[in-house]
């Protein structure tokens, strides 16, 4: 290293103690108090499954569930999330068993680049918890704040409908038109 | 599934065989990782002792840098290095002819957002704080704000190497006797139209991590679509041997062409890592992503076309005026592309193209999905709609009558292979009930039709060389697993998966038994990159060659062991067996062991170079392709007469894919293309405040409007399979072509709905409203440009057409 580079002697940003409940697991850590939940998840807990597209609350990419509700983790201070149940994409699968939404997204090709996928999966999970049999319009309304530039949303709708049917106990398969066209 | 000849037919004894993997819908090889948050994108990488970088960017659109003082920033605790232009003096650029970018500007800044200094610090906050401590003194220069401005003001020149003043590139090509062509016309139309620039808007912000290790080597992880070109540019800019630089393209969180250039932030983190001896990461803010741009060129166009009464085109004369922004990027290619593909859908016997790309003080334009071809396609298709009405011919019929024939050469020497546009048109006409509804829907509702074509891979590499465009290496494990190594980069389109499907098909095994290693300049053979819809065709053909060679290696020892003739050995269902007696055989793993015991380690390489184009004139390098995909589209619109708001409930699209490698992925590409086309048609604009220092109007995801679930239409997709002899198993591209017909189909549908022509993209509500008001006032029912700037066109390059006996070379007239 260049010897003229000054060595940092100033105290790093003030850190505060935090207790978080993420994906059912307790996390106790010290974090810079100005950090957003997005930053603490990614940088302090190494849960990089949560992505970001703007860090300004405009794209929905960083959505996580707080108390079961989809929230933009880039707009929420981590401070405000202590002791509240937080769920990220890493918490969707039950051990090695994928959530039906994840299975359906894999099956119909609802993830292309996959960057918006975590936020959309969690938003869809919250929707299905409230409406097990959503209409196409319900799905559009729920995902209106999640931008996807790859899919045109269509495979995403189809995957959510497929997962919803299976979660209701129906046996459902992707349609031929979805995978092969008309 | 379908049985195909072509590449598949080479298998076994030369008979076409039933395909088991190709053509079937199945998950992508990386789908599970992407749906569980396990895919590591560039910004997800963290290395021990890693520093964070920020770039200080110019607040001026055009200025001379008089002084940069970094002392205060360097003194800030936690800052490890600050570098400026003098630390990285060597220029770079994607094209050899426009090496005009500096990693950090040393003398002149050319747009708001051009970087002047790079900082590495212990964390992002410290690096950000240091930005405020750098003192830069600028002397503002007059900014060039538009193509018109560039035409009127050759000075101050943004780049001294431009063809003329502030015109970066001027092109003038003529194919055949234009006057004779127009002389045969019953109707000659001249139309002007305008296509606003727009940007890729990938959800992932560009990010890169550089690690200079103590052994003198450098590794760069970056969200790039072109690791090979980044490798070359890094070596040049850093003055380091390429053998000591490793570039790894991380999975791209969306690319669409926006991550195809080598970028200044990649050079800067690499240099900062070399200077500090520590890993350095940068992740651009969303605003900075807008400044990287390289998106769709704003294009003003003039199209003059002659038609017979029957609707046949007798001649076409096309002019494009492009706003290129501040640097070359792919701009020379983009300029030629605005003139290249007009000839590949309907027969155009003689053709002239003049193209001008201006330098302006805005973020540089480059290749966005469709690269230079959506703008002219918009012009061609809306003019054809107008001509059809004047001639009293149905818009579908006028196209079907005059389709380019398969296996022909166009006036500008593009060699057409398979051509499935006819069936595409027939499918969307039938599906949309076109014949019952076109010109028959109530006021405010309408249908419009348009078609398009796109290349399946550029015929030439970015830099001139005689090496393959794609390489694939295979390694067979004794357990029956196969590893595919290839330089291709998965940007979400599924290129990793395509390699697995193709190798699985040829070796008769399952894709799950194949591991794919890609986009790593140390580990994988070169593939030129994920651009120009080249990857499936080129890596696919290289993979077929590699897999067939492995099959050849395995076949002999297995045939000997089974005591059957070599030509009876078949690979399928995870086994290698006798075609005459399928019970007689062994598992693929046993076959590998058998072969390895005889001949040693089992592996192979394959490579692919596209066929040479018949064009031999200057400019003939842009447009040729191994195969052309075709698309036809019908859009239905609802226009609100009160507000001018256009809603699109449904789009029907037919796409000639040649042969689906995986139809589910093709569907995804087609739907995604329609989505992106719809965004361009209705709302997307890379716009600047020209009277306010050329500042970007809306560098944010909220203000730059893109379709949400509420604007996205239903898409009814028809996949047409006209196998192409040059495609892997007959396959052609799907990632870009289906975007192209959407914008003109929407424009034509608006005319059907409310009787006004919107000759501009995007067709935003104010434009529609103004056109409707003009119509109500008895004026021309149109919104669009009215004039073109004056351009010093260069001497014509005149090329007789094939029909005139031309040989592809330019001639004195």
Image (spheres, coloured by chain):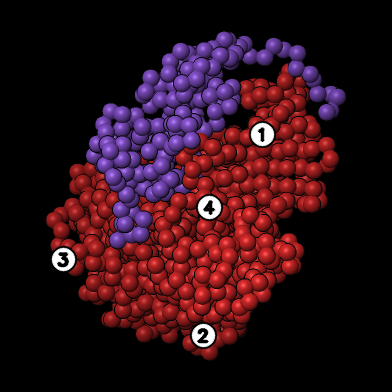
Chain colours: A purple, B red
Q: Which mark is residue A160?
A: none
What residue sits right under mark 2 in the picture? Answer: B802
| Chain letter of the residue carrying label 4 | B
- Marked residue nearer the N-terminal end (3 or 4): 3
In this rendering, does residue B695 appear at all?
no
Which of the pair B390/B743 is nearer the observer?
B743
Helix, strand or loop under label 2: helix
Q: Pointer 2: residues within 10 angstroms few (<14), some, or many (20+)?
A: some
Question: In the rendered view, does B417 fall on the left or right side of B468?
Answer: left
Residue B436 numbered mark, or none: 3
Q: Are marks 3 and 2 on the same chain?
A: yes
User: What element does badge 4 sit on?
Assistant: helix
- Which residue position is annotated with label 4? B512
Which of the marked residues, 4 or 2, is nearer the chain's N terminus? 4
CB atoms of marks 3 and 1 within 8 Å: no
Figure label count? 4
Q: Residue at x 50, y 63 (%)?
A: B573
Q: Residue furthest bottom?
A: B805
Residue B403 higher or lower than B236, as above or below: below
Q: Which residue is mark 1?
A: B281
Q: Earlier in the sequence, mark 4 or mark 1?
A: 1
Whichever of labels 3 and 1 marks the residue nearer the N terminus, that label is 1
The picture places residue B582, in percent across and down from the top left corner, at 51, 71
> Residue placed at 55% from the left, 64% from the top?
B575
């Amino acid at each position: 290293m260049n010897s003229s580079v000054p060595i940092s002697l100033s105290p790093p940003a003030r850190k505060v103690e935090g207790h978080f409940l993420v994906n059912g697991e307790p996390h106790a850590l010290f974090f810079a108090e100005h950090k957003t939940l997005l930053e603490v998840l990614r940088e302090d807990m190494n849960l990089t499954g949560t992505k970001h597209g703007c860090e300004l609350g405009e794209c929905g990419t960083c959505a996580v569930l707080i108390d079961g509700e989809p929230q933009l983790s880039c707009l929420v201070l981590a401070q405000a999330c202590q002791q509240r149940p937080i769920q990220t994409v890493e918490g969707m699968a039950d051990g090695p068993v994928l959530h039906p939404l994840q299975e359906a997204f894999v099956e119909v090709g609802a993830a292309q680049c996959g960057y918006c996928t975590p936020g959309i999966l969690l938003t869809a999970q919250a929707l299905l918890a409230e409406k097990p049999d959503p209409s196409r319009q319900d799905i559009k309304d729920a995902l209106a704040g999640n931008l996807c530039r790859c899919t045109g949303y269509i495979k995403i709708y189809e995957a959510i409908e497929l997962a919803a049917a299976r979660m209701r106990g129906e046996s459902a398969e992707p349609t031929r038109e979805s995978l092969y066209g008309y | 599934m379908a049985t195909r000849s072509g590449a598949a037919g080479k298998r076994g004894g030369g008979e076409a065989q039933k395909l088991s993997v190709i053509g079937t819908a199945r998950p992508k090889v990386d789908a599970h990782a992407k749906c569980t948050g396990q895919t590591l994108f560039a910004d997800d990488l963290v290395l021990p002792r890693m520093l964070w970088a920020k770039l200080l960017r110019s607040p001026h659109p055009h200025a001379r840098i008089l002084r940069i003082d970094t002392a205060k920033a360097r003194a800030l605790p936690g800052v490890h290095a600050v570098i400026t232009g003098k630390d990285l003096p060597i220029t770079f650029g994607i094209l050899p002819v426009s090496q005009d970018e500096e990693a950090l500007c040393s003398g002149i800044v050319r747009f708001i957002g051009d970087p002047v200094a790079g900082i590495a610090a212990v964390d992002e906050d410290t690096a950000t704080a240091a930005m405020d401590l750098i003192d830069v003194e600028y002397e503002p220069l007059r900014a060039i704000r538009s193509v018109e401005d560039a035409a009127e003001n050759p000075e101050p020149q943004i780049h001294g190497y431009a063809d003329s003043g502030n015109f970066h590139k001027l092109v003038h090509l003529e194919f055949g006797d234009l006057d004779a062509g127009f002389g045969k016309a019953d109707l000659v139309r001249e139309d002007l139209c305008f296509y606003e620039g727009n940007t890729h808007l990938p959800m992932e912000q560009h990010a890169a991590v550089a690690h200079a290790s103590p052994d003198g080597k450098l590794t760069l992880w970056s969200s790039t679509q072109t690791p090979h070109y980044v490798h070359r540019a890094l070596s040049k800019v850093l003055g380091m041997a390429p053998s000591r630089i490793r570039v790894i393209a991380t999975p791209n969180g969306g690319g669409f062409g926006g991550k195809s250039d080598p970028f200044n932030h990649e050079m800067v983190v690499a240099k900062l890592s070399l200077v500090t001896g520590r890993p350095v990461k940068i992740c651009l803010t969303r605003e900075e992503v807008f400044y990287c741009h390289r998106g769709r060129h704003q294009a003003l166009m003039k199209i003059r076309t002659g038609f017979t009464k029957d609707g046949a085109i007798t001649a076409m004369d096309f002019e494009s005026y492009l706003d290129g922004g501040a640097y070359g990027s792919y701009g020379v290619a983009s300029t030629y592309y605005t003139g290249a593909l007009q000839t590949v859908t309907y027969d155009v016997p003689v053709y002239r193209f003049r193209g001008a790309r201006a330098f302006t003080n805005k973020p540089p334009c480059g290749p966005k999905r469709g690269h230079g071809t959506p703008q002219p396609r918009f012009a061609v298709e809306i003019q054809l709609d107008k001509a059809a009405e004047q001639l009293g011919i149905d818009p579908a019929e006028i196209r079907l009558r005059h389709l380019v024939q398969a296996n022909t050469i166009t006036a500008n020497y593009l060699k057409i292979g398979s051509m499935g546009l006819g069936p595409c048109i027939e499918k969307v006409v039938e599906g949309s009930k076109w014949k019952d509804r076109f010109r028959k829907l109530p006021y405010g509702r309408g249908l419009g039709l348009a078609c398009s074509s796109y290349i399946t891979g550029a015929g030439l590499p970015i830099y001139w060389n005689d090496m393959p465009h794609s390489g694939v290496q295979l390694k067979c494990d004794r357990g029956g697993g196969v590893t595919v190594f290839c330089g291709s980069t998965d940007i979400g389109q599924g290129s990793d998966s395509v390699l697995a499907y193709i190798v699985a098909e040829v070796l008769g095994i399952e894709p799950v038994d194949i591991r794919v290693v890609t986009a790593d300049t140390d580990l994988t053979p070169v593939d030129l990159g994920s651009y120009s819809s080249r990857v499936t065709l080129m890596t696919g053909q290289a993979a077929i060659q590699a897999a067939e060679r492995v099959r050849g290696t395995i076949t002999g020892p297995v045939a000997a062991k089974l005591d059957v003739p070599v030509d009876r050995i078949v690979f399928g269902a995870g086994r290698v067996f006798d075609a005459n007696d399928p019970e007689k055989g062994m598992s693929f793993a046993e076959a590998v062991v058998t072969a390895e015991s005889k001949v040693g380690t089992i592996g192979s390489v394959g490579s692919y170079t596209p066929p040479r184009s018949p064009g031999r004139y200057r400019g003939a390098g842009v447009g040729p392709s191994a195969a052309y995909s075709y698309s036809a589209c019908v859009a239905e619109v609802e226009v609100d007469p009160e507000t001018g708001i256009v809603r699109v409930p449904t789009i029907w699209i037919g796409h000639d894919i040649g042969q689906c490698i995986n139809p589910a992925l093709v569907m995804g590409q087609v739907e995604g293309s329609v989505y992106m086309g719809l965004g361009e048609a209705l709302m997307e604009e890379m716009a600047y405040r020209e009277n306010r220092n050329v500042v970007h109007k809306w560098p944010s995801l909220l203000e730059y409007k893109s379709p949400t679930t509420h604007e996205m239409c239903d898409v009814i997709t028809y996949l047409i399979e006209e196998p192409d002899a040059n495609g892997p198993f007959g396959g052609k591209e799907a990632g870009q072509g289906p975007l192209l017909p959407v914008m003109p189909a929407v424009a034509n549908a608006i005319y059907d709905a409310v009787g006004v022509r919107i000759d501009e993209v995007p067709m935003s509500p104010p434009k529609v409203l103004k056109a409707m008001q003009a119509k109500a006032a008895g004026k021309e029912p149109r919104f669009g440009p009215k004039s073109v700037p004056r351009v010093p066109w260069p001497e014509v390059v005149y090329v007789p057409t094939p029909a005139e006996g031309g040989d592809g070379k330019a001639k004195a007239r």
